Image (cartoon, rainbow, N blue to C red):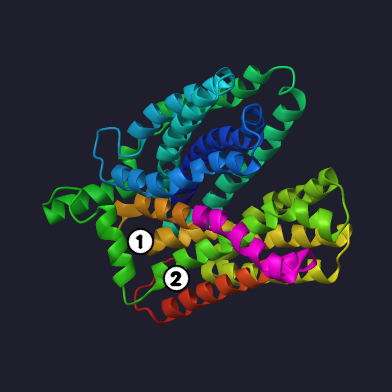
Amino acid sequence: MTTATTQRIRTGRITFFVALAVFAQESTWNLYESQVPPLLREHIGSAALIGLLMGMDNLLGIFVQPWMGNRSDNTRTSWGRRMPYLVVGMPVAALLFLAIPHAASSLPLLVAVMFAYALVANSFKPIAEALLPDFIAPARRSRANAAVKIASSVTAIVAALISIFLIDEHLEWSFAIPSALMVVSVLVLGLKVRDSRSPAYRNALAEDRERQAEPRAGDRVRDIVPDILKDADRSRLLLIGSILLFGGAWAASRSLITPYGMEALGLSAGDAGGLTLPSGIAFIVAAYPVALLAERFGRLRVMTVGMAVFAAAMVLGTAVRTPTGVVIALCLAAAAASSFLVNAVVVLWNLAPSDRVVGTYTGLYTVGWAGGGFLGPALVGGMVDVTGWPLMLLDVAVVALVAVLGVARVSALQRRSSTKRAL
């Protein structure tokens, strides 16, 4: 067996394990987002307060994920730096998720369990994803991350099936299934993965020896963030800003589509809510081919083109303002957006100055994406207040185009850079 063949097998193996872990995690998150609000509605009449409680996990993620990613970067054990957190965190999160429907009879207890679940689940989310750059070389990270994104996207279908067939009659079992998936996935990871053998972990140990310093010295979040802010190159800062902006455009195009369909297209709430279903399939179909194109022609170039096509699709949906036209536009937009969703974190990993800090950079990506998910719908909603619902998709396009300019600037800076990276 050739060295190249062996490398492909190893890459496929670790990609499968990471995709399994992400699939299990996202199965709980998707059901959480769809079925916890009805539990809150039994106690709370205010939609705003329900929304505030449901946004608690995003707020926690902004603070917890970079810190935990950084903590795992600086962990040194015989089992590696990621797995100790996963084998502890995932079973605890599974138990807390399983407890949610049992706590539903008491609002204080329900909120306490929600908070505990969100805290624990956010703690290991970037750690599982950071296993990918630990094991896989920069040149092949896009296709591996595409497989992980596809696994994550499929969980929306799983959550929908559980909601359709189980929620009404078997609430506790509905939460038990994703919990069981998480326990099974961590058992498989615990038995099959030793990230102490990963190239990135070995590189980090070698750097520790070279520097003859404590592993944490200079590698804390409070050291890394100022380094990004002060860097004259600005590539990393611009990329994180673009992640926030495009994440906002993406979130707005999903979360505001139901009121858009009702106000601009005259649809019922149910029909308007179904406008995005075909686009979810379009994303899954496009993700892996987009990753291959990125590895062939350059990630930044493919991202720029895809983001521009996303904005153009929003303009198309505005021009052809019919249910069919909007569905086609959303499908085109989702396929194009996959170029960004698959490659942005890979570019950020590859811009990291060392393998020692890829967990922290995974957390910073999440901060940008979650921040966009929090701010984007509010920003576009404010624009809609001025322009009206018929131009909502055009408002999304404007935000996306600003993100395009940011990525284009990163691309220009990297072309002039003397440091050649797999971007």
Q: Is residue 59 magenta?
A: no
The answer to whether residue 313 shows anywhere in this view is no
- Crowding at mark 2 (Cα within 10 Å: few <14, some 14-19, many 20+): many
Nearer the observer: mark 2 or 1; the answer is: 2
Q: Amino acid at mark 1?
A: Ala
Span shown in magenta: 369-395
Answer with left or right where residue 3 lies relative to residue 97.
Answer: left
* Residue labelled with disc 1: 352
User: Which residue occupies the foreground of this view, 212 or 216?
Assistant: 216
In terms of secondary structure, where does tag 1 sit? loop
Residue 116 lies, with reference to residue 320, above or below; the image says above
Residue 403 lies, with reference to residue 15, above or below; the image says below
* Residue labelled with disc 2: 238
Residue at screen point 24% across, 35% down: 77
Q: Is residue 375 magenta?
A: yes
Residue 393 lies, with reference to residue 193, above or below; the image says below
- Crowding at mark 1 (Cα within 10 Å: few <14, some 14-19, many 20+): some
Q: Main secondary structure of the magenta part?
A: helix
* Residue 109 image position (x, y, % from top left): 50, 23
Q: CA distance from mark 2 to mark 1?
A: 14 Å
Answer with left or right where residue 213 lies relative to residue 274.
Answer: left
Residue 296 image-quadrant placement:
bottom right
* Residue 416 image position (x, y, % from top left): 40, 82
Residue at screen point 82% across, 46% down: 269
Residue at screen point 54% across, 39% down: 53
| Residue that extends furthest to the front in the rendered view of this protein | 45
Answer with left or right where residue 363 lies relative to residue 97.
Answer: left
Q: Amino acid at mark 2?
A: Leu
